Amino acid sequence: MVLLVGIVFQVVHAEDKPSIMVRLDREARVWQLQAKSVSLPAILGELQRVSGMAIHYSVLPPASVTATCAAEKLPALLKCLLGESSGLVFGQADAAEPKEVWILGSTAAGQASDCPAVAAAVPQTPSTRQDNAELYAGVQSADPRRRAEALYALAANDDKEAEAMLRDAMSDASALVRGQAIGGWVRRHGAEAAEGELQQAMSDVDAAVRMQAIELTDSPDLLSQGLHDSDAMVRQLAKAKLDELVH
């Protein structure tokens, strides 16, 4: 059973009171999740605390969320929250529930949900939300978070200027920006066409960028390379994805 009332990405107003509730109704054996005007990282953090399932991710939409979901199993609850098209890689299960999950940034940050009752997980057309000139200015901001948010929006633009900004941002001083840039590049061109850029990301000094590259690829060569990464989380995700390819 999956109950999906909806997920809405919104701007938080002063009168909104952010709240999160995650609980297991043991009598009905149903997981319940309610969130109002809070970020996805905050919701996932509470879900991780209550369920004991480790949740890994590197890129998520920056907007606040309002959602109500219920499901018998944690994977279904996550699908309700993030959308049916979201990419999830689950680790070993314990008593029929997974012990950990990786939310793949290419889907969490780049696709709208397939569920008819769910609003789009990301802005559909950045030009309707912000003037392109404002986004271009954001890419030049001294604040890495603002640069990353601008690149996130620009990834949906098909103009050459946005393309050039994404490529330049892959060499940004901030790992957050570099990860967002490679994610946007793959959204535009596809993982197969972006294998060279993903290979470059696999050599990044920051493990978060290398993790992003592993999330974005299904290349056995790149995933095998990840098995020997210096970071344990990168190695674990690479192994989980390789195991999925085999099975």
Image (cartoon, grey):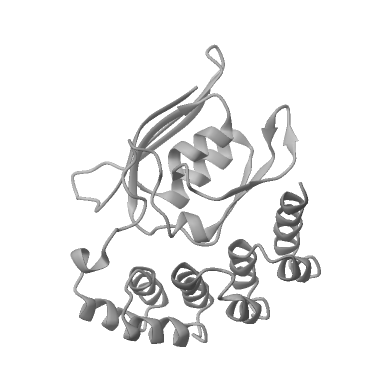
Above/below status of 108 relative to 155: above
Residue drawn at x 38%, y 69% as measured from the top left: 152
Picture quadrant of residue 216: bottom right
Residue sitting at the far top: 27
Above/below status of 43 relative to 178: above
Q: Residue 12 at what x, y percent from top left? A: 25, 51
Residue drawn at x 34%, y 37% as measured from the top left: 116
Residue 77 lies left or right of residue 13; in this view the side is: right
Residue drawn at x 55%, y 24% as measured from the top left: 72
Out of 36 and 190, give the one closest to the viewer.
190
Above/below status of 22 relative to 221: above
Q: Residue 167 at what x, y percent from top left? A: 46, 84
- Residue 141 visible to an observer of this rendering: no
Residue sitting at the far right: 228
Above/below status of 129 relative to 185: above
- Residue 95 visible to an observer of this rendering: yes
Residue 148 lies left or right of residue 51; in this view the side is: left
Picture quadrant of residue 209: bottom right
Out of 160 and 101, give the one closest to the viewer.
160
Q: Residue 107 at what x, y percent from top left? A: 49, 56
Q: Residue 128 at what x, y percent from top left? A: 19, 64
